[in-house]
């Protein structure tokens, strides 16, 4: 656990003046100390030596604070008033340096051009200074820290086993240009559970495997330079068990990647002796609802997802099951939709469904589900019984197919014509079979 020290002394002074800087006394209230500086990688020869933290505005010392250079120690101090940029220098003086000297000799780590009035800094690289003025010191070795704050749902954070707990993290990246957030990782009682590499950093945690008791939840955010910050909270699991249906999304797996613009099956194992309804949601919006009849027909365990209906990047899938008594449980995961090198329109025959039966003489419709991310489609051509039917406008439904004179197994396929580059391209669906029974 790193030590937190509230530093003393606010002394307006000119660094170059030949007056000894006063490092005693406290003139700043603790609540005004909104800048933190953590020492890392302090050279062994400099440990437990004198440390001075200077704050400069316009080349003038705004504050000078004396402490001891100790590894993994965090100091809190006040930024300059107003909104002007300021520099911070953590300075370990050499043996020959005196408080009134107008140059620096010793070890230092510098932050230049800061503007934030509430920020967290890490002095992790130390340079040698030999008779160098403050404004000439390099600042490339001192990196600003990442800051993470864990968020849990409002309330007492007590849950029944099987409840979904929405856990979030607010991450502040104060890094230099090019420094990014590399990962946000969640832990339960110190055991890593899941790690995110992009926003949103929301983890919908299913507590079904937790027994009664108190559990620590921690999150660690790490930037591309390897610097990290941690925040910790806790939840309590009661003796009660959420007795709603068991729900487990089996495909996709959490944080897996699918290609944006393709069709995929979202599959779930759902068990309950008295299941009443099942609902699928993508990013909080209902995309499919299965009734008792659908459940009896076994349709409720799969949702066919046209990923073109959602944006590339991280998406949230939730499956909610409710029993006849009104008890509800769910499972929630995130999946990443990767942008392909080239979007190609794709389609699947939606009507008729495979092996659907019709009476001879019925007029049926051909319908297609299409993924067309870049809106390139020119036309759709259905082919059935050696006849082609061309549609040139969405939703590309042909409503006049007459089954008169047909019998037994028939099929329909579709070709999607689209414009890409310098010419027309075509992609085909698979064929779907249907049955024409003799007229009654």
Image (cartoon, rainbow, N blue to C red):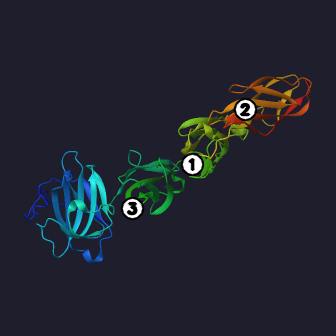
Q: Is residue 6 something one can see in this rendering?
A: no
Q: Quadrant of the C terminus?
A: top right
Residue in the picture at 64% in, 39% down: 306
Q: Is residue 204 above or below residue 145?
A: above
Q: Is residue 396 left or right of residue 242?
A: right
Residue in the picture at 38% in, 48% down: 156
> Which one is nearer the viewer's eye here, 173 or 211?
173
How packed mark 2 is, by other alpha carbons closer than 10 Å (few <14, some 14-19, many 20 or more), is many
Point out the tag, 3 or 1, that comes first from the N-terminus: 3
Instruction: Name the residue beneath numbered marker 3.
Output: 227
* Place of residue 58 in the rendered image (x, y in percent of width and height, measured from the top left): 19, 52
Point out the tag, 3 or 2, that comes first from the N-terminus: 3
* Place of residue 415 in the rendered image (x, y in percent of width and height, measured from the top left): 77, 35
* Place of residue 128 in the rendered image (x, y in percent of width and height, measured from the top left): 27, 71
Instruction: Name the residue beneath numbered marker 2.
Output: 368
Q: Is residue 335 above or below residue 436?
A: below
* Place of residue 433 in the rendered image (x, y in percent of width and height, measured from the top left): 83, 36
> Which one is nearer the viewer's eye here, 205 or 427?
427
> Which one is nearer the viewer's eye here, 26 or 47?
47
Q: Quadrant of the N terminus?
A: bottom left
- Which residue extends farthest front? 422
Q: What kind of element bears circle 2?
A: strand
Q: What kind of element bears circle 3?
A: loop
Q: Is residue 27 left or right of residue 402?
A: left
Instruction: Name the residue beneath numbered marker 1.
Output: 336
Residue in the picture at 12% in, 61% down: 16
Q: CA distance from mark 3 to mark 1?
A: 25 Å
């Amino acid at each position: 656990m790193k030590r937190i020290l509230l530093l003393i002394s606010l002394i307006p002074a000119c660094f170059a003046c030949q007056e000894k800087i006063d490092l005693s006394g406290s003139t700043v209230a603790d609540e005004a100390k909104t800048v933190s500086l953590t020492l890392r990688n302090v050279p062994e020869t400099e440990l437990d030596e004198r440390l001075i933290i200077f704050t400069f505005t316009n080349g003038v010392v705004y504050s000078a604070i004396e402490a001891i250079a100790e590894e993994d120690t965090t100091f809190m101090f006040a930024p300059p008033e107003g909104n002007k940029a300021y520099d911070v220098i953590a300075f370990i003086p050499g043996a020959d340096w005196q408080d009134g000297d107008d140059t620096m000799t010793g070890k230092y780590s510098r932050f230049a051009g800061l503007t934030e009035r509430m920020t967290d800094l890490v002095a992790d690289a130390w340079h040698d200074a030999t008779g160098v003025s403050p404004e000439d010191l390099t600042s490339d070795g001192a990196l600003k820290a990442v800051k993470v704050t864990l968020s849990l749902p409002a309330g007492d954070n007590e849950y029944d086993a099987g409840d979904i707990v929405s856990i979030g993290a607010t991450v502040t990246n104060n890094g230099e240009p090019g420094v990014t957030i590399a990962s946000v990782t969640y832990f339960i009682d110190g055991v890593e559970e899941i790690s995110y590499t992009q926003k949103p950093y929301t983890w919908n945690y299913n507590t079904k495997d937790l027994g009664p008791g108190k559990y620590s939840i921690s999150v660690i955010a790490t930037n591309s330079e390897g610097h990290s910050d941690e925040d910790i909270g806790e939840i309590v699991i009661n003796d009660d068990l959420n007795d709603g249906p068991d729900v487990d999304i089996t495909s996709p797996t959490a944080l897996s990647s699918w290609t944006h613009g393709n069709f995929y099956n979202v599959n779930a194992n759902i068990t309950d002796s008295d299941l009443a309804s099942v609902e699928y949601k993508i990013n909080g919006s209902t995309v499919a609802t299965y009734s008792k009849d659908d459940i009896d027909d076994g349709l409720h365990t799969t949702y066919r997802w046209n990923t073109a209906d959602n944006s590339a990047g991280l998406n949230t899938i939730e499956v909610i099951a409710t029993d006849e008594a009104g008890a509800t449980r769910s499972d929630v995961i995130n999946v990443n939709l990767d942008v392909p090198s080239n979007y190609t329109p794709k389609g699947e025959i939606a009507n008729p469904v495979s092996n659907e039966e019709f009476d001879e003489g019925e007029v049926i419709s051909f319908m297609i589900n299409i993924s067309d991310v870049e809106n390139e489609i020119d036309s759709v051509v259905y082919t059935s019984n050696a006849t082609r039917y061309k549609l040139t406008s969405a939703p590309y439904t042909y409503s006049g197919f007459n089954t008169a004179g047909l019998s037994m197994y028939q099929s329909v396929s579709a070709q999607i014509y689209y414009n890409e580059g310098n010419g027309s391209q075509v992609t085909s669906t698979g064929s779907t079979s249907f049955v024409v029974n003799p007229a009654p």
